[in-house]
Amino acid sequence: MEAYIGTAVTLAAVFLAIVLHEVAHGYAACVLGDDTAKRAGRLTLNPLKHIDPFGTIALPLVLAWLGTGFLFGWAKPVPVNFYHLRKFPRDMLIVSGAGIAANFALALAAAVLFSIFPGLTAMLKLFLLYFCISNLVLAFFNLLPIPPLDGSKLFFGWIRRPWAGRYVAAERYGMAALIILIVAVPTVCAAFGLPVVDPLGWYLAHAMTWFLDIIGV
């Protein structure tokens, strides 16, 4: 029973981090002139408004079942009309980076609470731990310059060249590459008894360790 409760707490932490990431995008866009997300009812913590069947439910469950050591996923992207923003490319960069900035801030808050309140219950400690980890995974994952991740817009979206626009718009190909990196390659290696090749896991683990070392946690 405790194992199921622990899994539920972990998944709740992952999902909350994902939802807050998307809300941050929508809120930043609204402040900067585009109320598309607000009109769509996406500036809310209501989970039903953000669920993506694969990224929010299936992928975290698969990663938990595979024992990858970390869980993450994504919600339905918040709709943003960049043409409604007041100043390009500045506002586009702010909106694209808002989710990442929110994840870093939330990870820092969770780490501080975990450190300064040692008397918290085991469940609260578990939630804060995985909330911190989930936010860091989301932040560093989204920094990758692979469409449709935020990093593709941060690194290439401001470049006024045809190839840059085509690269950022190549979302389906980028998503296929990400799924291969996340699930297919490690699974195939394990199935055939080969050394596990997991460049994404290596990157995320080292990036999170670097961040936690900086803040002294």
Image (cartoon, grey):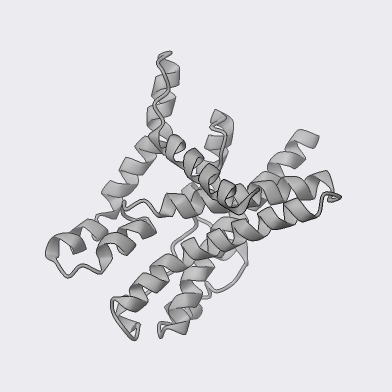
At 56% across and 42% down in the image, what residue appears?
A: 71
Q: Is residue 92 left or right of residue 115?
A: left
Residue 133 position in % (x across, y down): 59, 47
Q: Is residue 125 above or below residue 158?
A: above
Give the quarter of the image for residue 148: bottom left
Nearest the viewer among 201 and 66 is: 201
Residue 215 position in % (x across, y down): 60, 53
At 29% across and 76% down in the image, what residue appears?
A: 89
Instruction: Tell me, yes or no, if residue 50 can be seen here.
Output: no
Outermost residue on the left side: it is 162
Q: Is residue 31 left or right of residue 176?
A: right
Residue 198 position in % (x across, y down): 41, 31
Q: Is residue 180 left or right of residue 78?
A: left
Give the quarter of the image for residue 96: bottom left
Q: Is residue 13 left or right of residue 117?
A: left
Q: Is residue 99 above or below residue 65?
A: below
At 40% across and 15% down in the image, what residue appears?
A: 194
**Which quadrant does the N terminus fall into?**
top right
At 54% across and 50% down in the image, what residue appears?
A: 211
Q: Is residue 58 above or below residue 38?
A: above
Instruction: Tell me, yes or no, if residue 3 can be seen here.
Output: yes
